[in-house]
Image: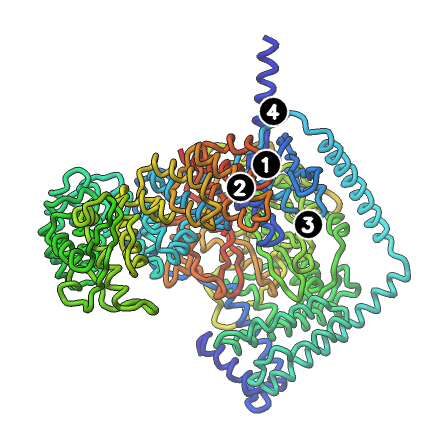
Amino acid sequence: MNASAEWEDLVSTALVGTDRRPIPGQAASEVELLERAAVHTLRTRAGRRPVTGVEPPAAAAPEEQPVIPPAAADRFAGLLEGKGPKLLDEWLEAAAGRGYRLAPHLLPRLLDHAAKDRSIRPHVGVLAGNRGRWLAGLNPSWRFLLEEVTSAAVTGFDGDEVWELGTSGDRRVYLSARRAADPAGARELLAATWEKETPADREAFLKVLADGLSDDDEPFLEAALDDRRREVRNEAAYLLSRLPGSRLGQRMAERAARHLTLKPGRILGGGKILVTPPETCDAAMERDGIRAKPPHGTGEKSWWLQQLVARTPLAVWPRLFGASPRDIVRMKVVDWRREVVAGWVRAAVVQGDPAWARELFLDDPLADLLAVLPPVEREAVAVDFVRHHADRHGRLVDRLVGVPAPWGPDLTLAVLEKILKLSSGNQSWYVGEVTRLAGERVDPALHDTAARFSPEPPIQEVAALLRFRDDMLKELQ
Amino acid sequence: MEIDVVLSAQLASVRCVIERWNRDQVLALAPDASSQKAAHGVSSPAKWSGTGVGADALWGECKGSGSKPYRACVDLSEPAYKCTCPSRKFPCKHALGLLLLWSADGVPAADEPADWVGEWLDGRRGRAAKAAEAGAARAAKAAEAGPADGRRADRREQRVTAGLADLERWLADQIRQGIAGSRRHDQWDALAKRLVDAQAPGVAGSLSRLGATLDGDDWPARLLGEYALLHLLCVAHRRLAASSGSPASSSDGAGDIGDAADAVAGADGEVRGGAEAGGAVPAGLLQRVRDRVGFSMTKEEVIAGGTVRDRWDVLGRRDEENDRLTARRVWLRGRETGRVALVLSFAPAGQALDASLVTGTTVDADLAFYPGSAPLRAVVAARHRTIRPGAGSVTARSGDAGIGPGGVGSDGAGPDGSDAVRPGAAGTTAPGPETPGPETPGTSVAGKTVAGTVAARGEDVGAGPPPGTSVRAALDQVAEALAGDPWLDSWPVLLEGVVPAGNDLRLLTGPSGGLALHPSVGTPWRLAAVSGGHPVTVAAEWTPRGLRPLTTWDEEGRVIVL
């Protein structure tokens, strides 16, 4: 009997008991069994041999990127402990933007995090380095990484190879770079492989064409209106609505003229807009991106009208009504004002039209509209809003989120003044939110200015957060 | 000219500052996860003023909610902590935050500590000296045991003997009736209580841990193995106690403690320990049996038995909560002696544990080992200094820490258990696997310190991992240790040149083969990330069911706590 068979025999005897199954020739079977079991147990423990014949996985490829500095690695680990997701995002963007890779021992935590949070994956693709991709090949829950941008695309070496062989993230980055340098070339590159791309890639690549959009792109986009994937059709329709000369633009202009008409007033610009909403949503409208089924709680006509306005090139309206955007926004809209203005707001945001955004913001200070304005104007508008109008329009935070970082000195001062005022009044309940937003958005180089502004705790809190971010970014230099 | 002298002196003092610990090493000192989080909150430079770091101390004032800042100070040589905040956590978040700030290079070097820091340091060192004196006095008093103590000791011996006889009968009953119905977690409670009453807490503890054998499909085999080892302990105690007239010294009894015990070390068929063939009971084994039964020793008694000075690498640590008590095991290995050591400390769950041994550091210290064969558990008798890892890179030595003479091979047991090798031969008298190199180093000799290769002690150790061994050599060390202590269930190994491989990467494999991880350890992703498929050094805890990885070192030689 070999050792393991003998052991199995001992175990099965022990299970039923030596009373029922005595060991032959032994007076005290139970003692004999225990002693043999002890011998066996120790022999197994002491005599264990190394396991042979198991090959380790192929080693990870050597790294091509510099590893993040140790202080930055420590800060990253601290951010994962929870200083707030915004700071982590900023760190990831800054570190990836500088082409660093993360120290290997931190990779599992980063990848676990990215498995839950899609939005950070483009940065993670860079930070993971070759070691991260090696790990992703071993762990199915990290496999998403293999589709993300790598540092090769960011540092932009051999383009043709990236377009042919890269991950979809790499190809997107490459297409963007190509689009910036040569818009027509990029479109042709995409058109050549268009039929073979996956639906998700078609959608992602089409979005790249938003930069450098021109009438030259119109035939390609018009064809994309018949794509199999709804998101692709939708994206094509939005791009075309930014081209007033497009066939889609013309169709939308005709629809606009059918459903919205001007009843001139006695004084210039004092007219009224009369609305007859669409009665049906026909196939042609659907092809142009108007969705037939309204979301729950919205009426059909209201839904179709809103989309019709949103998808119409904004350049159509001044021609149609013979007035400037400023006057049009101030005109009375009979019965359907809410839908029409909502459509214009959506159009201003999607078509990125600052002239309309400026006028619409004065009507209703929506954060999305601020984001459309050129940075200098945006900051001036925001300063004016914070100083003079914020109190009338509810929550300051909801508006200020439309001003992306970094906030300059003027807006910073205006917001700090506002925080002091709010914290001394009885509105302190939402000071915390404004404080946090300011800490996240103000240019971190202004931390000294903030620290000297006032010794009040909320201001010092902003200053501390700014200093943290300043240190954080300096570590990554 | 004079200015130059002053400047270079200042530079020298700055250079002497202890190598900064990394973030993981600092966080490992925290008593719990919430303390780690809180420490981040107070680790920003804006919170601190008057910070400084000297040769062996770190201090600063932290803005709190009150008007007076909290003063926090860390004695880096121990480390020990002091803070004026009212927190009951230890170290508190301020001390940890200060360490984090220091770890991120946010604390300027200073020549002289602030006054309040100096006072605290002096006070602490004064108290330490007094405590040592008091301890020595207690030990001296304990040594002169009176007749009352003798009677008490006799009574305990009788109780233990009766308790173990009870256990031996109980085990036999189990095997007679069969263990098929034994998959119940409460079945040992009453028995464990009886053994506590019988003043055999070691055995009682083993019983209360039996619940862990019940998970998994192979529970009958594992339970039988544990029952068999308990039986072995009962038999060993009975025979050794009977054969050695007085428990503290070996005498002329029969050396044979049973076939099973004999077979323990018989793996390679080599007969060792000719000395006890004449019948003397090996004192080391007797001590080991008494230790496993639960006869405890005071720290002073252990230290009185002699100490070993070495540069000890802190390999790693593991905390385990059991019955509302957290046990912290810190594993050490001596650079000169090659000996391994386990420093145990306990605290009620949720309270701070001893954080004085920082993973990845090397301390020059005197360790006193609890006596017995295969000595492992030790106390720190005296710390001389924390050696900073030098700046240079280290060329790791290949696994040459081979086994000592008479080593137990790992090639499996012979066809039967008849190879009679006396366990305990690898105890305190023979150079064990833990003694590579030509010296016969630090075995405990009563009353004095035996040093290893002292000559090299003054030198700093290099950065990067300490020199490790191959998988095969590690298994040989474990086999040797099992020969001295058959009840051993954990032993530190430092594997060099291993790669995570196999299913779920749960096999650490090197040129001589691989070792599986413990079933409770998942895929070691952090270790895999550090390795990237390349060989690394890993400190791990060996257990009969597999390895628990503790620590590794990355490509830049930094310690990574796993």
Q: The numbered mark 2 sits on a residue in which chain?
A: A
Return the mark for residue B387. 1
Q: Residues within 10 Å of mark 3 (few under 14, many from 20)?
A: many
At label 2, the amino acid type is Ile
Image location (x, y in percent) of residue B405: 54, 52
| Residue depicted at 34% across the width and 36% down the height | A377
Instruction: Determine which residue is flagged by label 3.
Output: B379
Inter-mark Cα distance, 2 to 1: 51 Å
Nearest to the observer: residue B525 or residue B157: B525
| Residue depicted at 43% across the width and 53% down the height | A109
At label 3, the amino acid type is Val
Q: Looking at the image, is mark 3 or mark 4 earlier in the sequence?
A: 4
Return the mark for residue A419. 2
Label 2: element kind: helix
Mark 2 or 4: the one toward you: 2
Mark 2 or 1: the one toward you: 2
Q: Looking at the image, is mark 4 or mark 1 earlier in the sequence?
A: 4
Label 3: element kind: strand
Instruction: Determine which residue is flagged by label 4.
Output: B13
**Residue projecting furthest to the top:** B1
Image location (x, y in percent) of residue B229: 61, 71
Q: The numbered mark 4 sits on a residue in which chain?
A: B
Nearest to the observer: residue B250 or residue A356: A356
Inter-mark Cα distance, 2 to 4: 47 Å
At label 4, the amino acid type is Ser
Give left or right: position of B419 versus A151: right
Label 1: element kind: strand
Inter-mark Cα distance, 3 to 2: 57 Å
Return the mark for residue B224. none
Give left or right: position of B248 versus B422: right
At label 1, the amino acid type is Ile
